[in-house]
Image (cartoon, rainbow, N blue to C red):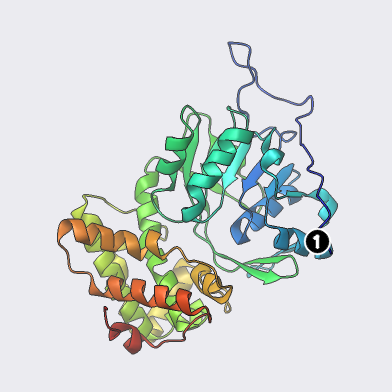
Amino acid sequence: MARRPRRTPILRCGPGPVAVSEGGGRSSNVGASDCPIGVAGAGSIGCFVGGIYVAAGRRVALLVRPRVIGEIEANGLRLTSFEGLDQKIAPDRLTLSENPEIFNEASVVLVTVKSADTAEIADLIARYAPEDAVVVSLQNGIGNVGALRQRLPGRRVLAGMVPFNVISAGEGRFHRSTSGDIVIEQDEAGTAAQLSVPGLNMRPSQNIAGVQWGKLLLNLNNALNALGDLPLRKQLAQRPWRMLFADQMAEGLAAIRAEGIKPVSSTPIPASWTPPLLRLPDAIFEVLLGRTMKIDPEARSSMWEDLQRGRVTEIDYLQGVITEIADRRGLQVPLSRRIVALIRRAEAAGKGSPGLTPEQIRNAPLS
């Protein structure tokens, strides 16, 4: 049966508080509740963040795949979290489309696509979003903002960092399974404060590059979690897994320091302290983890979800960044290279997580 063409709704600002610049044109006003927020690439993070904005009374347009549109139209958008959130949003409160024309009147565009899709989504933003729309990258990795700015010259593009992960549970449900506030590059307009709503706090940072590098170090565990096929809390409760993570972070820290970069930790623990703390006995580490981060018992990494769904992962933008630095600096990063090879092997097999042990990961051949 042929799929019926979808009518694309065009959202337009009403006669609300839209600021006017000295030259007479419309200036960006991301806090105006009558202007829509566009979410470019509404996967797990995008649907959760977009849904929180809808619940807070903001108008939201989600650029989303047909599969997710079908889920939400059939079931509504349900937001849950390990902290007890359970919010159901009716489909008619959302603007869902696979057509980027929904960004025609956006005052802010939140970019949540995978790193490999950044260039493509930037071209769509350039074509469809107003020139004064603020573009905020809420992506993993450290090169996305540069790619967005290159393809969106003259536009205001801000870097961001999302510390929590969201699981797509099916039937329109998106579950936030770890804690933390989103961090956004500080600007004179106070965009972080204007984008903060109940349930979604955004903090400004004057050193967003350091914040992103700090997050990259923590995200090195994404691949370990994907390879091990364990919930994050269960994985981190086992010292052999933490020792593996500590050794992986040590390689990452060495590479980052060789570049003259000082990472800013997204947890209360400085990045340089994390490897030794990961090596602590289980009982001591469990107490420490409980004081620094809240993790749902069933939380898993986004890379695990990518493998389960047969999608290409972001390994090139995580461990791949470390191996690229190592190649330029003449560093030895054998564990990072093994993990890249194992993830690519799992991608090619298309059977989800291989369920490896820490020992199997450590001893995997490099070839």
Q: Residue at x 44, y 70 (%)?
A: 222
Residue beneath disc 1: 76
Residue situated furthest left in the rendering: 330
Locate residue 323, reporting x and y percent: 27, 63
* Residue 183 is at least partly visible in this image: no
Q: Is residue 274 left or right of residue 105?
A: left
Quarter of the image where one finds residue 123: top right
Q: Residue at x 32, y 59 (%)?
A: 321
* Image position of 57 with respect to 69: above or below: above
* Image position of 196 with respect to 166: above or below: above
- Image quadrant for the N terminus? bottom right
Q: Is residue 46 left or right of residue 215?
A: right
Q: Amino acid at mark 1?
A: Gly
- Image quadrant for the C terminus? bottom left
Pick the residue in front: 267 or 76.
76
Mark 1 neighbour density, 10 Å: few (under 14) some (14–19) many (20 or more): many
Q: How many callouts does the rendering have?
A: 1
Residue situated furthest top in the rendering: 23
* Residue 99 is at least partly visible in this image: yes
Tag 1 secondary structure? loop
Locate residue 84, reporting x and y percent: 69, 68
Residue situated furthest front in the rendering: 2
Locate residue 179, reporting x and y percent: 54, 63
Locate residue 305, reporting x and y percent: 55, 72
Q: Residue at x 21, y 49 (%)?
A: 260
Pick the residue in front: 25 or 298.
25
